[in-house]
Amino acid sequence: MSAKIFKLSSSVINQIAAGEVVENPASIVKELIENSLDAESMSIEVTALGGGQELIRIEDDGSGMSREDALLSIERHATSKIRSVEDLQTLSTMGFRGEALAAISSVCHFELKTSDGKATRILSEGGTIISVESCARNRGTTIEVRSLFYNVPARRNFQKSKSASFAAISRTVDAIALAHPEIAFSLNGKRFFPTTLKERIEEILGEHEHPVAANGILGFVASPEKAMAMRTGQYLYINKRPIFSPLIAKAVKEAFGTRISEHSYPRFILFLEMDPDQIDINVHPQKKEVRFRDEGAIFRKIQKAVEEAFIPKTSFAAPLAFNAPLPTSFAEHFLPFEYKVEETQLEWETPDVPLAVLGRFFLLQRKNLLLVDLKAAHARLLYESLSFEKSGAQALMWPLEIPILPEEEPKAISLQEIGVECRILKKRLVIDALPPWLESSDFPQFYAEWKGGKKMEEIATRFCRSLSKSFSIDQAIAMWREVQKCKDRLYDPLGNSIYTEIGEEDLAHFVLKGKHG
Ligand code: ADP
Ligand code: MG
């Protein structure tokens, strides 16, 4: 055959590329949400009609684009996210190929409304720009994809049913929402409000009983009896990106051992944080798979972390022998996930025998009994860590974000003075590390107390009292030990006693009075 060679037009090239990036409505939803995440949106609303084949709309409140950038964004290989191949090794954004918008817009009726302060509306059909004009929109971006694959009949005809297609979109939104609990999402009006990771997981996947926590690994596995016949209960994220990895699924399964049958799949949700140079993300067009630099190491690490999730934690009522070592680390109970406490230097220095915990009260035996008010102890510990020890901040595995008003910014950033490592990022306060005795899940409450601006004595005490915590005996022991090292170990910052002694006479008051008593 002899044929003349032509260079393909850019719209044909884009359509061919679209075959890789945009297989179906769900993959479009994924690409568009990832762009919204990269634009630092706090709220992402998704609408899908006809299983996404009639309409997909993604609306965000992110950075938006200027007119110039908006026009570039739908050109192939146009990206704001990398400049060189080396940048791939330190990639922190979801996107990097600069292909998605070009590919998507080449196979539909496409509308882009975006504003970085000044709003622009671009309409295109099959990749050809029809109009560019000013419009009204708050900061952020809305993208509408209509008549998907109208110009690619082969692909149009191979689409799934509307309901299957919608189910895939829904799973995509869920999978992304799971990794970004601080962001509000909605799909056709079904809403996920900003919350904690644990709550977001429970909302979407139901309860997963066993927390998994190791350096760089965070997540949950469901009890073995919840294992399924399919892989659909398995969620893996690497640096918050949903990833499919048979290797890691296998490591988890090995960790379940004989707890599940050979042909069932354990349910899990795991988040790995890895140095970008330990993985290669550029191996799959939709970035769904990665290559690990050291497969054996990651396999063993996952297996071990999941195995440990099944080791029973000492129960609340377990009696403790005098001088017993701590049965489980303080960190595991009190400060799940975020903290790594080195227990090794701590010695049980007091001769007191721990007896029991009831709510906020801790009972010890010395000569008399000691009744410790753990809330007062907590306030003392927190107060001293905020006042005297500025270097002990513990890095959070997942930075905590709370929305703040612009006028709050100067005050918020002064949290750094009390050992809270934080920064301001577009209407949000991002917390990277917290002083000891301040749990990230309690931080919003602390912040509310703190910005009221009273004295630290009062802030610490009121905050600790307001928490509705119950303490395990391990936590109580650890707190009591630490209180012994405080500058003032008798009183909370407002002068209330941390503990009181109870003698036999005091107990006499409690003796039940009989008939003749
Ligand atoms: P990539 O995400 O790989 O860079 P895309 O084609 O998905 O490529 O997007 C191209 C560019 O358009 C992005 O790099 C970004 O600068 C811009 N962009 C896309 N979507 C949004 C959005 N929702 N908000 C702000 N900018 C966006
Ligand atoms: Mg993208």
Image: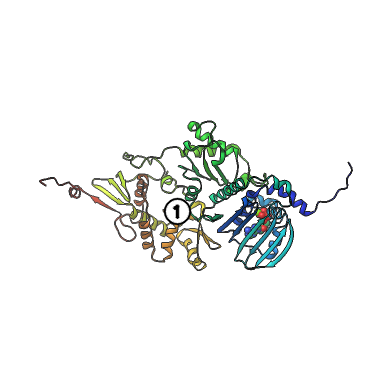
Cβ of mark 1 under 8 Å from ligand 1: the answer is no
Q: Where is ligand 2, by quadrant?
A: bottom right
Q: Residue furthest right?
A: 2
Which quarter of the picture shows residue 449?
Answer: bottom left
Q: Residues within 10 Å of mark 1 (few under 14, many from 20)?
A: some
The reply, left or right, for residue 132 in relation to residue 220 is right
Q: Where is residue 37 in the image (x, y as percent from the top left)?
A: 59, 55
Q: Where is residue 33 in the image (x, y as percent from the top left)?
A: 61, 54
Q: What residue is shown at x 73% (from left), y 46% (from top)?
A: 154
Q: What residue is shown at x 55% (from left), y 58% (from top)?
A: 43
Against 466, residue 170 (above or below) is above
Q: Where is residue 148 in the image (x, y as percent from the top left)?
A: 68, 52
Type of amino acid under label 1: Ser
Q: Say which residue label 1 marks.
A: 441
Which of the pair 255/332 is nearer the observer? 255
Q: Position of residue 346 (x, y in %)?
A: 39, 45
User: Does the rendering let one see residue 80?
Assistant: no
Which of the pair 221/107 is nearer the observer? 107
Against 179, residue 138 (above or below) is below
In which quadrant of the rendered image does the N terminus lie? top right
